[in-house]
Amino acid sequence: MARNKHPEQTVQQILNVAAQLFTDKGFEKTSIQDIIVALGMSKGAVYHHFRSKEEILDAVIEQQFNYSAQMLDHLITNTSTTPAREKLVQILEHVVSDPQAHSLDHVLRTQIKNPVFIVRGIQQAVRIDAPVIAAILREGITDGSIHSEDPEACAEVFMMLVNIWINPTLFGRNSSETKQRLYFLQRLMNMLGADIVSESLIERILDQHAAMGAYPILNEDDDRNEG
């Protein structure tokens, strides 16, 4: 495969191929040589842009974060549902169900206990996602559908809890324990004046975690206890 004349196209090729290999083989089992062979590029062409597969993974994750942020902005711009609470509920349910937003979940799951990854996830939630959510909460305060006294802090707490604390892989929780915490989050947001955690959102989050294999494998005794 000839190298693209435009560097950004070459970088995108590398990220696309690497993301597919990370998904198919797993990050740990994918070598930088695997990526080079799959691309059909020279080693120098790849190393010109990335020094290691870890650096490629960082770029893949960053691209995924950027997609999620752009999707959120697009949904807000194109969602006319009023009042604001209903709009936010609709947006959150769509985000959880969007296939592309979760296309790298299996890859990201391998990094979930990496402290650097966790910090990046928290920063993404607070600096990028939460301000968007807070803007809709402020709309809801204006139209009377939201009653939060501090929409910025409310949005930050919600994003950190749903992205980090709720994640069953990070804490080794089963589906029952995860569901219990989702209902706690629902009650907490209600107490904060933001009734945005719908029953549908809870079920979609549980289904999404199940689809990515986030729950620990249960033995027979655990299975009976959970049921």
Image: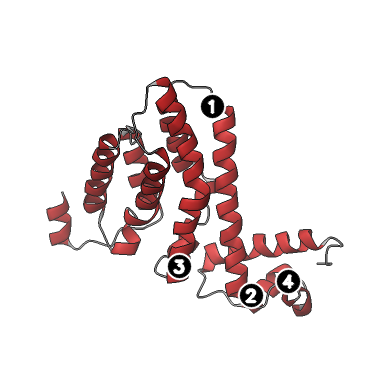
Q: Where is residue 147 in the image (x, y as percent from the top left)?
A: 33, 29
Question: Can see residue 87?
Answer: no
**What is the quadrant of residue 184 in the picture?**
top left
Callout 3, which amino acid?
Answer: Gln
Identify the residue at image location x=42%, y=20%.
143
**Closer to the observer: label 2 or label 1?**
1
Identify the residue at image location x=34%, y=35%.
149
Relative vertical location of residue 119 with respect to residue 71 in this rendering, above or below: below
User: Most extreme residue toward the front, as rendered?
Assistant: 149
192 or 214: nearer the viewer: 192
Callout 1, which amino acid?
Answer: Thr
Q: Name the residue under label 3.
A: 111
Q: Mark 2 points at which residue?
A: 34
**Closer to the observer: label 2 or label 4?**
4
Callout 2, which amino acid?
Answer: Asp
Q: Where is residue 14 in the image (x, y as percent from the top left)?
A: 69, 65
**Label for residue 49?**
4
Q: Which numbered disc flags the more N-terminal residue, 4 or 3?
A: 4
Q: Where is residue 3 in the image (x, y as percent from the top left)?
A: 83, 67
Q: What's the CA distance linking mark 1 and mark 4? A: 38 Å
Query: Helix, strand or loop at disc 2?
Result: helix
Relative vertical location of residue 85 with respect to residue 172 in this rendering, above or below: above
Q: Dot 4: few (<14), some (14–19), or many (≥20) neighbours within 10 Å?
A: some
Q: Do the residues labelled 2 and 4 touch (CB within 8 Å)?
A: no
Identify the residue at image location x=34%, y=63%.
170
Lateral position of residue 59 relative to residue 205, left or right: right
Q: What's the CA distance linking mark 4 and mark 3? A: 22 Å
Q: Mark 1 points at which residue?
A: 79
Q: What's the CA distance linking mark 2 and mark 1? A: 42 Å
Q: Which numbered disc flags the more N-terminal residue, 2 or 1?
A: 2
Quadrant where the N terminus sits is bottom right
